[in-house]
Image (tube, rainbow, N blue to C red):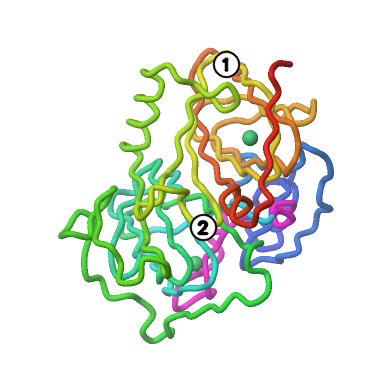
Amino acid sequence: MRDVGTTHEDLEQFLAGHHLVGAGLRREGRATPREGNTAAHWSWEGIYKGLMQSGKIVTIGPNGMTGMRSVVGIEARRFPIWMNAQILMPGERTQAHRNLRSETRLVCQAPKEAVFVCENQTYPMERGDVVTNPAWTFHDHWNKGDTPAIWVDGYDNGYNPNVNVDERLPKDAPYQAIKSHAGEGPIAVGDFRALPDDPVFPIPPMRYPWAATHGALSALRASGTADPYDGFMTMLANPIDGGPTLPTIAWHAQLLEGKQRTLPHRHNSTTFYFGFEGEGALVIEGERLNWNQGDIFAVAAWKWHHHEITGGGDAILFSIDDWPAMKKLGFYLKEEARGF
Ligand SMILES: [Fe+2]
Ligand SMILES: [Fe+2]
């Protein structure tokens, strides 16, 4: 397969070979979308190499491309929600904006000096943190460290397909003023924060630190209450009402033990997964999707699926699912098999 090369053209070809396209490159890509139940699967190798090269040859921020450099699966945008991956190189800060969609982020790697800036507050980027930027909240990203910061985004683009009002700060004053840092004052990191003036819109940004998520998974495991369909699974709850993470999508983290095999189920919501630790298989309608750490993959609505952890070690998946939107719309349906 073609290597990542040195030019934009080389990178486009490399990404296409991994069924990916990059922002700032040719969005339409060069490869034909794959078909089939297991087609929505993109390897970490393609994502990581594509991002790193993109970081070298695509300029972002006030003096470069408007928006963020990213790579996304060619097939991903067929879904109402999706994940893609982004990279922020050392020294970079993006031009702040807000828009009418939910933007959420799971940190893959970052130096300790890198931060997300959300509504005038900085949030650290530790591996495994999830940070939400609900609709109409200002956000930018700032890497003050000396290694690249990489994260996976979860979007609900399919729920506002008509007009995405996008308000961006001007190039000559591109950044938000920083008024507080996570952990300072009453608006703090974690589950404790001041209520917003309007508790409905916009919903405040939120950080779910990996330490807290990991603690929840460990406690679930200690309790022995594995879900037969999803293993030890927790939802990252909305801080206002304890419900799903956002009105449209819920973030989940799940731990599956070595050799664990879950029972099949199907639901008419869409799920996008990120392989956070370990490796395993998602079997969709009898077709096997083998995933490794760092891979992004999806299961389409109403497809029977179950997990198989082939190795002896634990596996941890993060996922986004649009069941909150489907429930609110009155369409949500789930079927669970009693056995194979
Ligand atoms: Fe954004
Ligand atoms: Fe599922």
Q: Which mark is residue 247?
A: 2
Q: Which mark is residue 94?
A: none
SS under mark 1 = loop
Residue pictured at 40% horizontal, 51% vertical: 238
Q: Which quarter of the image is occupied by the C terminus?
A: top right
Packing grade of label 2 (10 A; few <14, some 14-19, many >=20) is: many
Q: Which residues are magenta?
A: 52-79
User: Which residue corresponds to mark 1?
Assistant: 260
In the rendered image, the residue lying farthest to the left is 185
239 left or right of 280 in image: left
Who is closer to the viewer here, 54 or 323? 323
Who is closer to the viewer here, 13 or 244? 244
**Position in image of residue 297 (x %, y %):** 65, 40
Three-letter residue code for mark 2: Pro
> Which mark is nearer the camera, 2 or 1?
2
177 left or right of 79 in image: left
